[in-house]
């Protein structure tokens, strides 16, 4: 007598072709990346505020090769110096392409993004300074909100792109 039960699927095994193609297309869509960025930010905020010692212990964990390259660094240093460097390099390359050959090559089209970039640096620094202007505030970290705003702005604009009006400009 033959066993007519369907074959067991392996956890995290290879997906069938239609599901794999759908997953690959979903991960390539900028909307998914923006939603994942915002979800990860919310999860990190909850984790850092609910269990700060756990969060800090993960940040202080050292990984990487120590002997030949002297790269046995903490995860905080890897994120700040490594991942942000790659992110801003890619963002700079994309910005240059848009300014040279893209939609922002016209000065009138580039005016709004330039004003937004200046405000994106000045406004978070101003809010940070106002919030920390008390005697117990920490005034030495204002560069953090100015450096991370581009990632959240890109993530938000890409995750909300399907709901933008058709003549919204280069942000949708």
Image (spheres, rainbow, N blue to C red):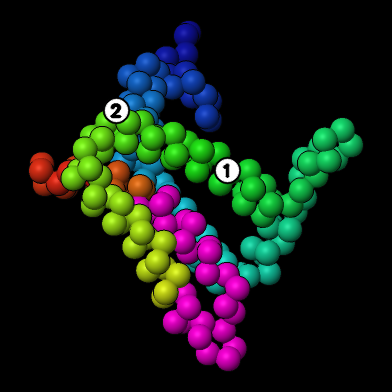
Residue 132 lies within the magenta run: yes
Residue at the spot 35% in from the left edge and 40% down from the top edge: 32
Reading the image, the residue beneath label 2 is 101
Q: Secondary structure at mark 2?
A: helix
102, 166: nearer the viewer:
102
- Image x and y of residue 62, in percent: 77, 50
Q: Main secondary structure of the magenta part?
A: helix
How many circles with numbers are drawn on the protein? 2
In the image: residue 143, left or right of residue 73: left
Give residue 56's mark: none
Res 23 quadrant in image: top left
Residue 33 in view, yes or no: yes
Structural distance between the alpha carbons of marks 2 and 1: 24 Å
The crowd level at tag 2 (other Cα within 10 Å; few <14, some 14-19, many 20+) is few
Question: What is the magenta range?
Answer: 128-153
49, 133: nearer the viewer:
133
- Image x and y of residue 120, in percent: 37, 60
2 shown above or below 139: above
Residue 12 lies within the magenta run: no
Reading the image, the residue beneath label 1 is 85
Q: What residue occupies the far front of the structure in this picture?
A: 107
Residue at the spot 44% in from the left edge and 34% down from the top edge: 93
Residue at the spot 36% in from the left edge and 48% down from the top edge: 155
Q: Secondary structure at mark 1?
A: helix
- Image x and y of residue 52, in percent: 63, 70
46 shown above or below 137: above
- Image x and y of residue 161, in percent: 22, 44
In the image: residue 143, left or right of residue 108: right
Residue 172 in view, yes or no: no
In the image: residue 69, left or right of residue 144: right
């Amino acid at each position: 007598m033959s066993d007519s039960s369907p074959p067991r699927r392996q956890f995290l095994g290879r997906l069938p072709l239609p599901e794999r193609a759908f997953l690959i297309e979903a991960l390539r869509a900028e909307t998914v990346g923006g939603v994942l960025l915002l979800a990860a930010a919310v999860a990190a905020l909850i984790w850092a505020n609910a269990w700060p010692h756990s969060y800090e212990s993960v940040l202080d964990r050292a990984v990487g090769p120590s002997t030949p390259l002297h790269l046995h660094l903490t995860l905080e240093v890897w994120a700040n110096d490594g991942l942000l460097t790659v992110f801003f390099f890619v963002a700079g390359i994309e910005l240059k392409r848009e300014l040279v050959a893209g939609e922002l090559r016209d000065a009138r089209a580039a005016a709004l993004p330039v004003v937004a970039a200046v405000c994106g640096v000045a406004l978070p620094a101003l809010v940070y300074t106002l919030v920390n202007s008390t005697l117990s505030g920490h005034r030495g970290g204002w560069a953090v909100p100015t450096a991370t705003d581009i990632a959240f702005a890109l993530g938000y604009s890409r995750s909300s792109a399907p709901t933008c009006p058709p003549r919204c400009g280069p942000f949708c």
